[in-house]
Image (cartoon, rainbow, N blue to C red):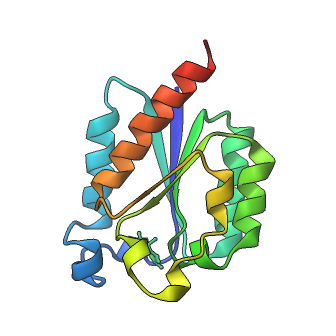
Amino acid sequence: MKILVINGPNLNMLGIREPKHYGKETYSDLLKKIEAHCEGKCAVDFKQSNHEGDLVDFIQSAYFENYNGIVINPGAYTHTSIALLDAVKSVMIPTVEVHISDVSSREDFRQISYIREACIMTVSGKGTDGYLLAIDHLLNYIQEESK
Ligand code: DQA
């Protein structure tokens, strides 16, 4: 079982950017935390970019490289990108959307998520633990689907 974790714009700035929304853990802390969580459960790889087209390429690569599931935090592209929605629909790989902050209690422009309708679940407001919840949900989902 292998999972691809994709992070969008500014998530490489974790630990520096707006700690009141995103906490103090760095991007590298996040990757270590996810790796430790996945040990003995599944293989995990990571991609991050600040560019929308790169994120589309990462989603497509999950198809060509036979990933079983995707966890994606599209950052601000959540609220603008039909291209990411179409990419997730194209690959037909179970995908969970993650937001570190509780987007539902933030600005109006954060209330729209284009990608959500193509995802099996959205986790929001659970801090970086949201990625771990997303992975566990994906693994259960994939196991159930294979029965
Ligand atoms: C975010 C929420 C988005 O609104 C924001 O643009 C981000 C991070 C989150 O993880 O809470 O970059 O996706």
Residue 83 screen position, x and y as percent? 76, 68
Q: Residue at x 30, y 59 (%)?
A: 126
Q: Residue at x 42, y 40 (%)?
A: 135
As rendered, which of 16 and 134 lies closer to the eye? 134
To which quarter of the image does residue 35 belong?
top left
Q: Taking 60 as reference, is 140 above or below it?
A: above
Residue 146 screen position, x and y as percent? 62, 17
37 horizontally vs 52: left or right: left
As rendered, which of 123 and 48 lies closer to the eye? 123
For ligand 1, the image quadrant comes to bottom left
Q: Taking 45 as reference, is 112 above or below it?
A: below
Q: Taking 58 as reference, is 94 above or below it?
A: above
115 horizontally vs 127: left or right: right
As rendered, which of 4 and 112 lies closer to the eye? 112
To which quarter of the image does residue 100 belong?
bottom left
Query: Split into 4 quadrants, where in the image is the C terminus?
Result: top right
Circle count = 0
Q: Residue at x 43, y 28 (%)?
A: 42
Q: Residue at x 29, y 37 (%)?
A: 37
Residue 15 screen position, x and y as percent? 24, 74
Name the outermost residue toward the top: 147
Name the outermost residue toward the left: 24
Residue 127 screen position, x and y as percent? 28, 62
